[in-house]
Amino acid sequence: MDLTDTRNMTMLCDFYELTMGNGYFAAGYKDRICYFDVFFRRCPDGGGFAVAAGLEQVVDYIQNLHFSKEDIDYLRGKKLFSEEFLEYLENFKFTGDIWAVPEGTPVFPKEPILTVRAKAIEAQLIETYVLLALNHQSLIATKANRVVRAAEGRVVLEFGSRRAQGADAAILGARAAYIGGCHGTACTISDEKYGVPAGGTMAHAWVQMFDSEYEAFKTYCELYPTNATLLVDTYNTLKSGVPNAIRAFNEVLRPLGITKCGIRLDSGDMTYLTKKARKMLDDAGWSTCQISASNSLDEHLIQDLLRQGAKIDLFGVGERLITAKSEPVFGGVYKLAAVENEQGEIIPKIKISENVEKITNPHFKKLYRFYGNDTGKAIADYLTVYDETVDDSKDLEIFDPNATWKRKTVYNFTAKELMVPIFQGGKLVYDVPTLEEVRGYCKAQVETLWDEVKRFDNPHDYYVDLSQKLWDMKYGLLKNHQ
């Protein structure tokens, strides 16, 4: 269930979508078919790839598109829009086509992750929300995947609701973090609405509320014997926190035959404290007790802690995950790639800039991913014009995306189209997968990437090449606009 089920998001658009829509209507372009691509120009944090997320929210948004009477009255009050245009909006709905990569797909710069084919006003109007949904959740899913990979198989929980930029950022951020690989969240409503497993035990306030730390721990173990994780750093981690936790475990859990328990640290030198705590727990016969750590963690801090030998079984990651603090903007854009003339011929369009990275790839396109038949690993991505097919029974020469004089021959591979139909003629034709299916798909697809692409520092540049036909078309358009 998506929150947009109960909220009309149609007016969540940049105002210029409406002024352009009114202009298209007046100029006779309202029914002109056009093609827009969503893509991004660089991976967050200098990474080698990103994780696509947010498609389910786009689906819900498209299905709920409509202007209410209050919306029309508001627009009429701006005294900018013709009555004919406002009457058109009264019966507005999306009637176009959308293709997208499934949520959880690893994606790379400059390749489309969603393509819209629709009438000009329809395609223009949805730009803001589509970008909002994909940019936010792709950013958080990408950051979460980095954090999870840094943890090297240890449990990672998302703890960031109280530091997120608003309610939706917390709720949908937890969803995206789960797609990226987090095992659960502290955000209860994300569990209720989306099935992201929620959990938690205590805050420092619980410990302070009681007359003694030991009484706080003992009471908690009595109330929740099968879920006893005790926060041991309220006063002094090694002198009182861990000893009082061991005492509570001994007096409450051991007589019940319960060996599953945990302690959590939220401050201090995590490497030193967890090593000492681990020895204290083991010496007391609690080798099964897990040690959790939180406090402004990210992938780099987690990686350093583990390299230093910290004894941590579970990480709670909050503000630096839910806000993607190190690089909090994904940077996806929505650009016109083609229009259809009156005869139905597709006319490619290109945006040119003095900044080379802002030059777009024109035309209605297909996106292929090549997988090595011998390794199962992703070799390269390949953009073609919509009417091209790839013969993966033959060797294929591709170019390095950052140095076109470098060539690479791809052989013994299988080509797979990445983008799938989502809407056709305004009708949903996609079976939206469950969140668990998306999370599993993400994990499997990330495993198809070589380690060199997944490393945090100076990752390998993954090949994203254009077919010869598409390159010739792009080069021709560049020459025509010189």
Image (cartoon, helix red, strand yellow):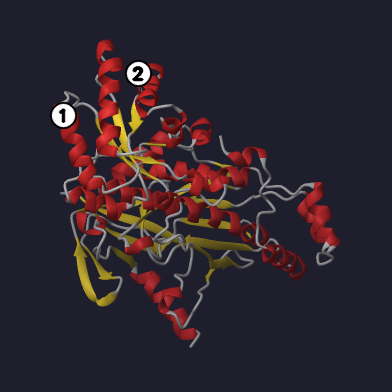
Disc 1 on helix, strand or loop? helix
Report the residue at 68% width, 45% height from top: 8
Q: Is residue 382 above or below residue 287?
A: below
- Which amino acid is tagged 1? Asp
Report which residue position mark 1 lands on. 282
Q: Does the rendering let one see residue 447?
A: no
Report the residue at 27% width, 65% height from top: 461
Q: Is 376 in front, or is 322?
A: 322
Q: How many marks?
A: 2
Crowding at label 1, few (<14), some or many (≥20) Cα neighbours within 10 Å?
few
Q: In which quadrant of the rendered image does the N terminus lie?
A: top right
Q: Is residue 431 left or right of residue 283?
A: right
Q: Is 268 in front, or is 190?
A: 268
Residue 470 spot, x, y in % from top left: 40, 70
Task: Say the numbered circle drawn on residue 225.
Answer: 2
Instruction: Choose top left, top right, bottom left or bottom right for residue 317.
Output: top left
